[in-house]
């Protein structure tokens, strides 16, 4: 159940299954391999196996960071509307 702290590309893996429900809402574990679906996203959990990845994005530049930034921007708009009304 390790949490991935950054986005990356899988470069070595052994029967790797990822829980992406935090980002997609899909409850099934996703099998990752070099040939098929090598992208690993921050905020997801490793459920089985092991692997190594090359980090491609961290913080606000990662997929979860972009989502949180967009949610925060939407929240700021709502706050400003509430203050005006």
Image: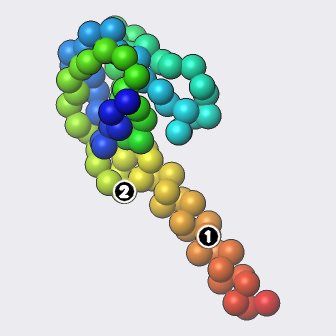
Q: Quadrant of the C terminus?
A: bottom right
Q: Quadrant of residue 81?
A: bottom right
Label 2 crowd bin: few (<14), some (14–19), many (20+), radius 10 Å: few
- Residue 34, picture quadrant: top left
On the rendered structure, is 32 left or right of 75? left
Image x and y of residue 10, in percent? 27, 22
Query: In the figure, residue 82 lies in which quadrant?
Result: bottom right
Give the residue at x 62% y 66%.
74
Residue 57 placement (x, y as % from top left): 29, 44
Q: CA distance from mark 1 to mark 2?
A: 17 Å
| Residue in the picture at 70% in, 90% down | 83
Dot 2 lies on which element? helix
* Residue 22 location (% of width, % of height): 53, 39
Nearer the observer, 80 or 49: 49
Q: Answer whether residue 61 is visible to the viewer in this image.
A: yes
Read off the residue under disc 1: 75
Give neighbour class at mark 1: few <14, some 14-19, many 20+ (Cα, 10 Å).
few
Nearer to us in this view, 56 or 6:
6
Residue at the extreme bottom: 84
Q: Circle 2 sits on which residue?
A: 60
**Is residue 64 depicted above or below 74 in this figure?**
above
Of marks 1 and 2, which one's residue comes earlier in the chain?
2
């Amino acid at each position: 159940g390790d949490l991935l702290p950054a986005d990356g590309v899988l470069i070595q893996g052994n029967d790797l299954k990822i829980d992406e429900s935090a980002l997609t809402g899909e409850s099934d574990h996703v099998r990752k391999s070099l040939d098929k679906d090598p992208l690993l996203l921050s905020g997801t959990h490793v459920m089985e196996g092991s692997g190594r990845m090359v980090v491609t994005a961290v913080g606000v530049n990662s997929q979860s960071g972009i989502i949180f930034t967009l949610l925060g921007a939407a929240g700021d708009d709502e706050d400003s509307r509430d203050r005006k009304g």
